Image: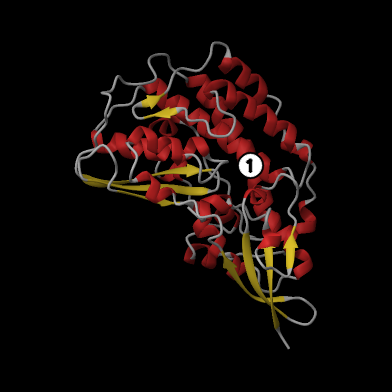
Amino acid sequence: MSEQITVGVGAGAQYLGVDRVIDLGPLHPSAHGAYRLRLTVTPDLVITAAEPLVGHLHRGAEKLFEVRDYRQVLTLANRHDWLSAFCNELAVALAVERMTGMDVPVRAQWLRALLCELNRLMAHMVFLTPLSPNAAAYREGVQALMEEASGGRIHFMFNRIGGLREDVPAGWTARVAAFLSTVDTSTLSIATEELEGLGVLTQEDALAYGVTGPIGRASGVDFDLRRDDPLPAYKALKFEPVTRTEGDAAARVRCLLDEVTKSVELATQCLEQLPSGPVNLRLPKSIKAPEGSVYTRVEAPLGTSGVHLSSRGEKTPWRLKLRTPSFNNVQALSALLPGTKVDDLPAVLSSFAVIVGDIDK
């Protein structure tokens, strides 16, 4: 006879009224928030049904956007997914730039692409660290470079409407190149064979739930905005996303490893083609987007990060709706967890990259 249990994931999960707390490791991003899973299990603890229960973080970002001007919005835009801060800033900046018809300087476009790839590399290393402590050294290396360029360790606040806050420091590109030459995923020594066959997400289910990013590509969803809807700099880069068909925990981890290699390649190409020139535009003190609406999207580390901006011609947005990858991706747990043993939950969930703030936006 089946029974229901509720497990909690992340720091503070023990206060959510759960039967069991799932520990995903000291550096897993779910430690920054908490969500619950209502599971139906057999007497031998095999999951037959799963329902993600979210909403405990209450970020309220979309409502906060409506009472802040566009410069202030950028400050909040990098906080709902704290590992994709630069990419989230960029999605909002692109929306305002498109509505106002701004022509962003070419150097800023290339630096944005470079910093997006460094941000992706950093985020993936955080997810890989619980599986391989060696990833922490790479994470610290790329995070130091992002901090040197932006002045922020987590919330970079480096994008501005019309480009970047300022140019990167002298010698920074050489230090980036030196770091990229040291990144080697073979040193992480992750035994992905132990994850084979666990938590299978089919391509059909991934498409039905709108799953994007490495999780979707691990299930055969051949979709990546860097190729399919590229920003200007990406159009000049040689890039083809890596996809797998197995859809299990091993495939998801291998996709993360593949993307680390791809990000190193793309960042290196950006360095080789980086032009000189200004990185921002001279703007008035108050920015007003014209009346209308626009949708922009970027390929964030976890998938498609979209912004639907509606304006009434004021200096604050009338509505700014976020399409966050974690919100869609976490729903797919109801499709991939049935058939999984409760004892295998930590391994499956560790391979399933979500940020709780990105869900409870």
> Local crowd at mark 1 within 10 Å, few (<14), some, or many (≥20)?
many
Residue at screen point 58% across, 59% down: 219
Residue at screen point 75% across, 69% down: 342
Asked if residue 82 is positioned above or below residue 357 in the image, the reply reads: above
| Left or right position of 130 against 147 | right
User: How many tags in the picture?
Assistant: 1
Q: Position of residue 89 (x, y in %)?
A: 44, 37
Q: Report the front residue among 65 and 99.
A: 65
Q: Position of residue 292 (x, y in %)?
A: 21, 46
Asked where in the image residue 53 lies, by quadrant, the reply is bottom right
Task: Check the image and name the residue furthest to the bottom.
Answer: 1
**Quadrant where the N terminus lies?**
bottom right
Observer able to see residue 79 = yes
Residue at screen point 36% across, 21% down: 280
Q: How is the image coloured?
A: secondary structure
Residue at screen point 51% across, 38% down: 85
Observer able to see residue 222 = no
Task: Check the image and name the residue furthest to the front.
Answer: 15
| Left or right position of 346 against 50 | right
Q: Position of residue 288 (x, y in %)?
A: 24, 35
| Secondary element at image label 1 | helix
Asked where in the image residue 197 lies, by quadrant, the reply is bottom right
Q: Which residue is mark 1?
A: 124
Residue type marked 1? His
Asked if residue 344 is positioned above or below residue 238 in the image, the reply reads: below
| Left or right position of 58 against 20 | left
Q: Position of residue 153 (x, y in %)?
A: 59, 30
Asked if residue 144 is positioned above or below residue 291 in the image, the reply reads: above
